[in-house]
Image (tube, helix red, strand yellow):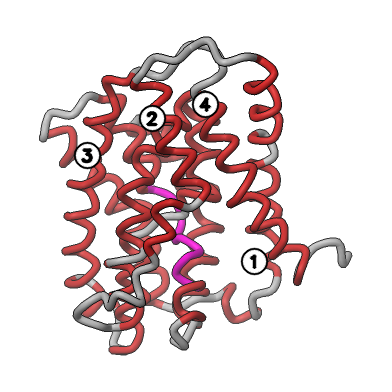
């Protein structure tokens, strides 16, 4: 109907990334009881282990999922990175409660660092991340600053934040879920019809991204002795559809976006079924 698309999507994306998502993260430690600070180190540790395992898979598995050498990097990125920022936070909040957004934010610290280091290597095909390729400002972007500040609030047990601060942050943060879904829906509507069909490589990658890898990580982390709560949140975050950063990096470095766009679309579509099933049978 012409309400969404183009500049509106770009501006709404900026609003979500720079304002509503950071507010959502901050408000997770300002409503009700504080999240448990004892989970901070286990969450960071489980995230490091998870992305170490996924890094190995991202470099080794794609050669068996496609015959096109040029698609291996995009598939590796798709296997490794889920859409935590736009979908992870809202989904975690709906499953585990609003305060659990804090735990997802802690997990996202390692994810964000890996996207712009390992993820860039996968997309560009370079063996080393050049200084110019790794944008250090990402580590002190608004969402990351919100995460650091929230961890500090929880670690120091600051529970007397005035309602004049917490209430507006909560209201702004609540915009994140519907706004993110509007952006995802609008971007999907702009894809060519052939993206609806996919191909063997796309569906194989989708199966690993939404089912095999999350379930495998779930059992691995359980065997390593992490608490069930930490394992469950980590599993949900890993089970997200492909991160939109993949398309952004392809565009930035002049790589073909066909594969990453198709697998992003298919995983986003199927995740509407796969995530509820994962929660129903495993969490």
Does the magenta segment cover residue 240?
yes
In the drawing, what numbered circle is on residue 151? Answer: 2
Q: Which of marks 3 and 2 is nearer the N terminus?
A: 3
Q: How crowded is mark 3: few (under 14 residues within 10 Å), some or many (20 or more)?
A: many
**Going from the N terminus, do you reach mark 2 or mark 4 first?**
4
Q: Is residue 202 above or below residue 240?
A: below
Query: On the rendered structure, is 209 left or right of 257?
Result: left
Residue that mark 3 sits on: 46
In the image, is 4 to the left or to the right of 137? Answer: right
- Residue at disc 1, secondary structure: helix
- Mark 1 or mark 2: which is in front? 2
Q: Which residues lie in the magenta part? A: 239-247
The span from disc 3 to disc 2 (Cα, nearest Å) is 16 Å
Task: Report the quarter where the C terminus lies.
Answer: top left
Quarter of the view holding residue 130? bottom left
**Callout 4 touching callout 1 (CB < 8 Å):** no
User: At which x and y percent is residue 92?
Assistant: 48, 35
Res 64 seen here: no
> Element type at marker 3?
helix
- Residue at 36% of width from left, 65% of height from top? 116
Count the labels in the image.
4
Q: Earlier in the sequence, mark 1 or mark 3?
A: 3
Name the residue that disc number 1 marks: 188
Q: Which mark is residue 28?
A: 4
Earlier-in-chain disc, 4 versus 3: 4
The x and y percentages for residue 80 are: 31, 61
Q: Distance between the residues labelled 4 and 3?
A: 21 Å
């Amino acid at each position: 109907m012409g309400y969404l698309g183009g500049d509106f999507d770009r501006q709404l994306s900026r609003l979500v990334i720079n304002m509503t998502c950071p507010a959502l993260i901050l408000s997770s430690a300002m409503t009700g009881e504080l999240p448990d600070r004892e989970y901070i180190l286990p969450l960071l540790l489980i995230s490091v282990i998870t992305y170490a395992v996924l890094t190995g898979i991202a470099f080794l598995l794609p050669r068996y999922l496609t015959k096109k050498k040029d698609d291996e990097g995009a598939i590796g990125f798709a296997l490794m990175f889920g859409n935590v920022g736009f979908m992870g936070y809202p989904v975690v909040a709906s499953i585990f409660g609003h305060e659990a957004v804090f735990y997802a934010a802690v997990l996202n610290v390692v994810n964000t660092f890996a996207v712009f280091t390992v993820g860039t290597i996968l997309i560009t095909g370079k063996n080393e991340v050049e200084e110019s390729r790794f944008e250090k400002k990402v580590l002190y972007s608004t969402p990351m600053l919100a995460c650091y500040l929230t961890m500090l609030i929880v670690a120091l047990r600051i529970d007397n934040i005035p309602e004049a601060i917490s209430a507006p942050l909560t209201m702004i943060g609540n915009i994140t879920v519907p706004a993110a879904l509007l952006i995802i829906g609008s971007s999907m509507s702009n894809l060519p019809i052939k993206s609806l069909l996919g191909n063997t490589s796309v569906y194989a990658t989708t199966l690993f991204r939404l089912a095999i890898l999350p379930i495998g990580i779930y059992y691995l982390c359980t065997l390593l002795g992490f608490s069930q709560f930490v394992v469950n949140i980590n599993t949900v975050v890993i089970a997200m559809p492909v991160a939109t950063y993949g398309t952004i990096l392809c565009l930035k470095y002049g790589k073909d976006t066909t594969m990453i766009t198709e697998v992003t679309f298919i995983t986003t579509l199927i995740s509407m079924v796969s995530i509820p099933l994962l929660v129903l049978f495993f969490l």
